[in-house]
Amino acid sequence: MARRALRRVDSSLDLSGRLRTVDDLPLPWRPEQLFSRGGPLEVEVGTGKGLFLASSAAGMPEHDFLGIEVS
């Protein structure tokens, strides 16, 4: 079964509070600096639409979640 292509992100949508690029990360990178706490870190590579990441974060609020998407 073929997957549908992801829709382009609406350019008027403000993701500044959630979206970071590699250049935005502090060096040396420490999760505590990004999340302002030291919770367990969960990393998802290939987040797609982010549905799994969002539901996981809602179910485990004591964890920090980092999603990495190439596109």
Image (cartoon, rainbow, N blue to C red):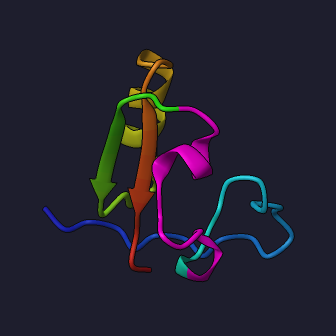
Is residue 30 covered in magenta? yes
**Nearest the camera: 12 or 64?**
64
**Nearest the camera: 5 or 16?**
16
Q: Is residue 29 above or below residue 65?
A: below
* Image x and y of residue 70, in percent: 39, 78
In the shown orientation, is residue 7 left or right of residue 11?
A: left
Q: Is residue 71 above or below residue 59?
A: below
Q: Is residue 11 above or below residue 29?
A: below
* Part of the protein shown in magenta: 23-37
Image quarter (top left, top right, bottom left or bottom right) of the C terminus: bottom left
| Picture quadrant of residue 25 | bottom right
Please name the residue shown 30% across and 52% down the image: 44
**Nearest the camera: 21 or 4?**
21
Image quarter (top left, top right, bottom left or bottom right) of the N terminus: bottom left
* Image x and y of residue 5, in percent: 39, 74
* Image x and y of residue 12, in percent: 86, 70
In the shown orientation, is residue 5 left or right of residue 22?
A: left
Please name the residue shown 55% across and 71% down the image: 7
Please name the residue shown 48% across and 70% down the image: 28
Judged from this view, the residue extending furthest toward the left is 1
Please name the residue shown 50% across and 19% down the image: 61
In the shown orientation, is residue 4 left or right of residue 61?
A: left
